[in-house]
Amino acid sequence: MKIQVQPMGPYQTNCYIATIDGKDIIIDPGMDALKWIKEHVTNPIAILNTHGHFDHVWSNDEVQEFYNIPLYTPKDDVFLLQSSEMMPGLPPSTPDYELEGDAELELEGIKIKFRHFPGHCPGCSTIEIEDAMFSGDFIFERSIGRCDFPFSSPADMVDSLQRFKKLDYDKTIYPGHGGPTSIKAEQANVDYWINTL
């Protein structure tokens, strides 16, 4: 699998393109992402959202329309795609598929697993493809997603971190902001973050 990344917009939100067997999967198309995407894909087949915050979904509708490909979004965050208190100019988008809880799907032979880790927002999820975990704003290198936004839940984040700590395998983590890390590296920090919430 080939992974390309470009930070988008003032929040430097990572937009990813994961390419397997010549098929491109676009993850979290943020602000003004279409121009970069057009320069780096040859055969896009889907758009995946880790969650619904504006800086991760800004270009959903534009990319959907340009490529005529389906959008997959965690069900609990679909309402966030319609408007944003923090960014009133958000272009609304509508997913073709709403994913509930932990969900597995297969797109043209590519297996994808969504893991629901709420706390940062109701639908916050990670996306696993082969040996990669795209973590959105759930977990970062030596950090976790903020829980002081509208619809955040520190209690849900504690539960999510406890479940994350129990994962019995390792993958490279590609977060929504900043550089990569790994499941095992961040599991070592989980107790610290739980104690701060």
Image: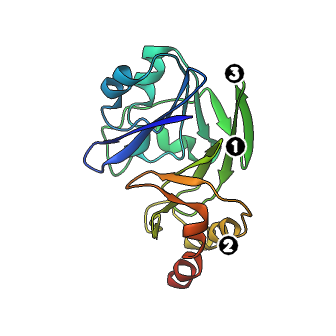
Label 1 to label 3: alpha-carbon separation: 14 Å
Q: In the image, which disc is placed on residue 113?
A: 1
Residue 83 visible in this rendered orientation of the protein: no
Three-letter amino acid code of the residue under disc 3? Glu
Label count reads: 3
Please tell me which residue lies in front, 50 or 96. 50
Q: Secondary structure at mark 2?
A: helix
Q: Residue furthest bottom?
A: 195
Quadrant, the N terminus: top right
Contact, CB < 8 Å: mark 1 with mark 3? no
In the rendered view, would you say 179 is above or below 36? below
In the rendered view, would you say 66 is above or below 112? above
Residue under label 2: 162
Residue under label 3: 108
Where is residue 177 drawn, in percent x and y? 39, 53
Three-letter amino acid code of the residue under disc 1? Lys
Contact, CB < 8 Å: mark 2 with mark 3? no
